[in-house]
Amino acid sequence: MKHYKHITNFGILLLLILVISCKNKSKKIDAEKNEITTIQNDDYELIKSSESKALLIVFPGGGSTSKETKRDFKIVEKATEKGISVLLMNFGRHLWIEKGDSEQLSNLILKAIKDNNLKTGNTFIGGMSIGGTVALSLSDYLSKTNSLLKPKGVFVIDSPIDLYALYESSQKDIVRKDFSEERLAEPKWIINYFEEEFGGKDSLLINIQKVSPLTIKTNNIDNIKKLKNKKLRFYTEPDTLWWKENRQTDFESTNAYILQKTNELLNDRNWNNVELIQTKEKGYQNDGDRNPHSWSIVDTDNLINWILE
């Protein structure tokens, strides 16, 4: 303020009024200029902000599509109002992705960006459940290739990012005497599928580490190492009672436990941009049913601020 030391009190007051008036007018003009356009096809739904400051790419949970994501993840309207374009992907049936999948996804997203004149300088990628696993793997691929798309940050929402841990928890489940046949169907499927894809017990751990974002058992983070300097967020709601009562699942077999261990491992490796966000009583499905494995555990206003920081 030393440059204004000779200005009268009236002059200072007038200057403040003008500054505040200009700021308010500027915000109003930006809001009026911001046009929202929706583009849909078989691969994605894009909700585009004409005043785009950032691009948010979101992958759905298992078996879901962009339609369910838009309904359950209450972020689209808030994000576009803030000038964030949102690309909701229809890619929800992969427990993991390999190099070929990453190449195809990369080309698909880059084409969407080019066709719709999207800016990529401030891009964030995330997803729910297996969508978060895909988001991590794809972001690492984009960060280590010559792609024009370099994500600034990645977030996962209660995702099974350690595939070997998922296999081990399934092994524990199938020997449980208190499980119904219906409850045993999922772990049996996982074991059969993983052993078919990665081999028997001797080779499974070796082969699964080629595609799993990380493996806590061996402290292997090679498949996400290019994300060390990115902003990372791990969302989870460690409701041990709910998992015990509704799924007969021990805490050590939950995604929340693995995300806690991942956070510890990355902190030990001096990853300085990692946040573990653990919520309480926020997890509800769109129909109102209590479930900690839900989009609703994310504070969307806070996430938007994180993107725009």
Image (cartoon, rainbow, N blue to C red):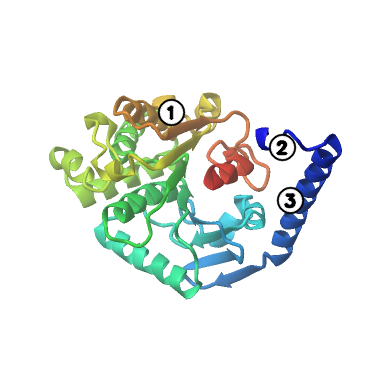
Count residues near mark 3 (Cα–Cα under 10 Å), then give few for <14, some for 14-19, many for 20+. few
**What mark, if any, has residue 4 been given in the picture?**
2
Residue that numbered label 3 is attached to? 23
Give the left or right position of residue 227, taking residue 240 as reference: left
- Identify the residue at horizontal 51%, vertical 32% (top origin): 277
Q: Going by the picture, which residue comes out furthest to the bottom?
A: 115
Q: Horizontal and vertical percent for residue 64?
A: 50, 57
Marks 3 and 2, how far apart at CA: 21 Å
Question: Up-down: is 164 above or below 280?
Answer: below
**Along the line of sight, the residue nearer the viewer: 198 or 131:** 131
**What mark, if any, has residue 178 been given in the picture?**
1
Q: Horizontal and vertical percent for residue 212?
A: 28, 44
Q: Earlier in the sequence, mark 3 or mark 2?
A: 2
Q: What's the residue type where badge 3 is placed? A: Lys
Q: What's the residue type where badge 2 is placed? A: Tyr
The quadrant the N terminus occupies is top right
Give the left or right position of residue 275, taking residue 145 as reference: right
Q: Earlier in the sequence, mark 2 or mark 1?
A: 2
Marks 2 and 1, how far apart at CA: 77 Å
Q: Secondary structure at mark 3?
A: helix
Q: Would you say the residues marked 2 and 1 are in contact, meaning their CB atoms lie under 8 Å apart?
A: no
